[in-house]
């Protein structure tokens, strides 16, 4: 039987930081209000398109795996904020990498996107259809954020992450997953003005209004993720005590705490970085995983449990058995272009442009 081990990993975080105090300069809020309700202290704002973030993360992941781009067979780009709908954003990353032999496609399940993509890529590797794949989760939410709505503006940020999976005969990589969707309540998290449904209307495409029913999202998120965790453990014939590290989607600290109580894992097994970046949608869970590796929270042979939820409302939990290597084989000599502006300056530009267009 074939497995699909994670052999490379890389992240890309834009340098411009937007703090809670920055948000308080144009929203009726303050650091205490945001921190106590969400756990978020700051987030990143990108000065480049999402494909550029994904490209840098991808180069770093390929270097960590010591896999040449010309030997890459599949690229799956998960996001909700693609550069374009046609052509797809995965093909742009393929072009930047010079991965001429690769197939490429986009996948959108919002915040669960990276993990859903990991399932797809793993299945293809296990079946023998491909020998390797590059999985990317990346978002630039800031250009489509409704910055006048403090209920959502305080939650989200930009970033990207990538992982390389390669065929192996040793047990490892994604061992089990549980995925689902509360489609009956999909409208409780809706971005109006974003998509072809809004084309050819009086409202300019991209002039967004966010519908975000926080309490209902909270309940569904905890319910979906906790049920998925139980299903994954049952599939793998493991218990919560067998799990070494839990790396949950970092949407809100209160959701993470409620999930931990529901699943019953020890709090010290749970990795949290929501205070640094907020919710980066498809990039959130994988960036948390990479930072858990960098901080030696993930060790060789560990069982890693990754629950997540996103728009739709999609939910999942993925069980990963880590391999023997927790250090990159090599590093990539690539960086984003310099950014001369602060996060607040970038956001004020977005707000000004939107005022003129909308």
Image: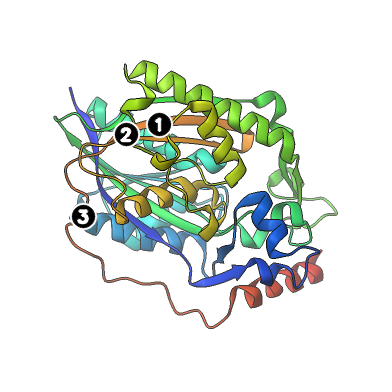
Secondary structure under tag 1 reads strand
Q: CA distance from mark 3 to mark 2?
A: 17 Å
Density class for disc 1 (Cα within 10 Å; few <14, some 14-19, many ≥20) is: many
Residue that mark 2 sits on: 320
Secondary structure under tag 3 reads loop
Q: Are marks 1 and 2 in contact (CB under 8 Å)?
A: yes
**In front here: 134 or 16?**
16
Instruction: Tell me: 112 left or right of 145.
Output: left
Percent position (x, y) of residue 146? Answer: 74, 58
Percent position (x, y) of residue 5? Answer: 23, 38
Q: Are marks 3 and 1 in contact (CB under 8 Å)?
A: no
Q: CA distance from mark 1 to mark 2?
A: 6 Å
Q: Residue at x 47, y 49 (%)?
A: 272
Residue that mark 1 sits on: 318
Density class for disc 2 (Cα within 10 Å; few <14, some 14-19, many ≥20) is: many
Q: Are marks 3 and 2 in contact (CB under 8 Å)?
A: no
Instruction: Tell me: 101 left or right of 229.
Output: left
**In front here: 207 or 285?**
285
Instruction: Tell me: 190 left or right of 323.
Output: right
Tell me the number on the disc at residue 327. 3
Percent position (x, y) of residue 317? Answer: 45, 30
Residue 189 can be seen, yes or no: yes
* Quadrant containing the N terminus in the rendered view: top left
Q: Residue at x 46, y 59 (%)?
A: 51
């Amino acid at each position: 039987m074939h497995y699909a081990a994670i052999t490379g990993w890389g992240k890309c975080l834009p340098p411009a930081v937007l703090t809670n105090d920055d948000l308080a300069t144009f929203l009726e809020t303050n650091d205490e209000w945001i921190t106590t309700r969400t756990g978020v202290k700051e987030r990143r704002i990108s000065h480049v398109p999402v494909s550029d973030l994904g490209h840098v993360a991808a180069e770093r992941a390929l270097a960590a795996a010591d896999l040449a781009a010309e030997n890459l067979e599949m690229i799956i780009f998960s996001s909700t904020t693609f550069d374009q709908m046609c052509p797809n954003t995965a093909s742009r990353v393929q072009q930047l990498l010079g991965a001429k032999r690769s197939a490429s496609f986009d996948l959108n399940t919002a915040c669960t996107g990276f993990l859903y993509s990991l399932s797809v890529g793993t299945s293809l590797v296990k079946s023998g259809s491909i020998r390797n794949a590059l999985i990317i989760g990346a978002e630039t939410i800031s250009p489509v954020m409704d910055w006048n709505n403090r209920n959502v503006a305080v939650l989200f940020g930009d970033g990207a992450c990538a992982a390389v999976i390669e065929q192996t005969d040793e047990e490892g990589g994604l061992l089990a997953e549980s995925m689902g969707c509360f489609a009956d309540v999909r409208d409780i998290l809706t971005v109006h003005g974003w998509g072809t449904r809004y084309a050819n209307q009086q409202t300019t495409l991209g002039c967004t209004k966010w519908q975000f029913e926080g309490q209902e999202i909270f309940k569904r998120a905890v319910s979906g993720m906790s049920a998925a965790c139980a299903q994954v453990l049952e599939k793998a014939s493991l218990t919560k005590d067998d799990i070494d590290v839990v790396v949950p989607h970092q949407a809100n600290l209160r959701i993470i705490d409620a999930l931990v109580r529901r699943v019953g894992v020890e709090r010290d097994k749970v990795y949290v970085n929501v205070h640094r970046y907020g919710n980066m949608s498809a990039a959130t869970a994988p960036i948390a995983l990479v930072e858990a590796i960098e901080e030696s929270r993930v060790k060789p042979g560990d069982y890693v449990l990754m629950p997540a939820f996103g728009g739709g409302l999609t939910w999942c939990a993925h069980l990963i058995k880590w391999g023997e290597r927790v250090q990159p084989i090599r590093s990539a000599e690539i960086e984003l272009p310099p950014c001369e502006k602060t996060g607040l300056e970038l956001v004020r530009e977005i707000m000004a442009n939107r005022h003129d267009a909308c």
